[in-house]
Amino acid sequence: MGEPVMEELEFLAEILMRHPTDSLRKIAEEEGIDYYRLKRLYDKYYGKYILVSAVYNIRIIGLRSYLAFLSVPSDRILEIGYRMTQNPFVAYVNPAFGFKNGLSAILHIPDDQKDRIDEMLSKYSNDYEYYEVRAYPYSGDDNFGEWNLSYDYAVLMDILNVDARTPITKIARRLGKTRPTVKFMINRLKEMGILVGFDPALENNVHDRSVLGIAETLDESVIERFKEYEIIVGVFPGRGYVIEWFFSSKDDLGTKILEFSNYVDKILINYFDSTFKELNDKNGMTRYSRRVKKDGSGYRSILDF
């Protein structure tokens, strides 16, 4: 497969941002685009370079989000990364070098288990730091819910997280339910505020590096400078901000660091290589269903893995 044409890929990303789960024919009609041109681009890039995933408000189901940075010897990065991706409460882990050399990770921790984070991370490294992170702009809402749905909802959330464009018929077969029941379940997730939308994300074979920076204050002009799928801003409540800028390894790393250093106080480079992508993807396929007890009575312990 040849390299993606970025103009085509960006065009498809913008279309899917407006119509994340609509059929191609409906998109073509509403956007006034030739259907066969759209289908050609979709078949060329979807599932290979771009995917639409569900966006969840995990606060509603009692999960707190953290960024963790661990010092790990270079000869143990793959071993420790593999162990971490066996834990479904570790959402992503990647090699990282900067203010910590080793691994960076996103953690989703049940509210009533936040006092176990140090014990969890100490299984992987004796030198780490972590920050609770919230969406930007920060609403200030510190009310956390709990898991009070059946196990089937966790499986559904996994499916929509992997590919939100999965046909309802296929989801129904996977869950052993009817199409109307699946639609009811999806609508219930929306009504409860758990499923808040769908987001097209470029795969790591497009953006295989990122500069991650931590800052005490946020220069909001950085948000205006980059496309929505190139930059993510988060809030460390009471402590500052995190800004992550995604780019390609074909770009000059030194230039990126110099440019980004104007906006942050601490910098780290994330490397999204194919081995870790496979580990993260495998973990992500069943992340929610492995977090939840089979009887739906709540979350398993973050120390079980």
Image (cartoon, helix red, strand yellow):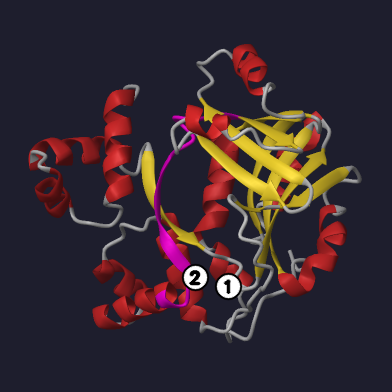
Pinpoint residue 107: horizontal percent, then vertical percent.
Answer: 69, 55
Vertical side of 118 occupied by 262: above or below: above
Q: Is residue 220 left or right of residue 230?
A: right
**Image quadrant in which the C terminus is located:** bottom right
Residue type (three-letter) at the residue carrying disc 1: Ile
Residue drawn at point x = 63 percent, y = 46 percent = 234
Pinpoint residue 233: horizontal percent, then vertical percent.
Answer: 59, 42
Mark 1 surroundings: few (<14), some (14-19) or many (≥20) residues within 10 A:
some
Mark 2 surroundings: few (<14), some (14-19) or many (≥20) residues within 10 A:
some
The answer to whether residue 273 is seen in the rendering is no
Residue type (three-letter) at the residue carrying disc 2: Ile
Q: Is residue 38 left or right of residue 265?
A: left
Residue drawn at point x = 49 percent, y = 35 percent = 204
Residue 193 painted magenta: yes
Residue drawn at point x = 56 percent, y = 30 percent = 221
**Location of residue 62 (image quadrant):** bottom right
User: CB under 8 Å between callouts 2 and 1?
Assistant: yes
Residue drawn at point x = 35 percent, y = 22 percent = 3
Residue 34 badge: none
**Of 230 and 48, the residue lying toward us:** 230
Q: Disc 2 on helix, strand or loop?
A: loop
**Location of residue 109 (image quadrant):** bottom right
Q: Which residue is mark 2?
A: 194
The answer to whether residue 112 is seen in the rendering is yes
Boundaries of the magenta span: 191-210
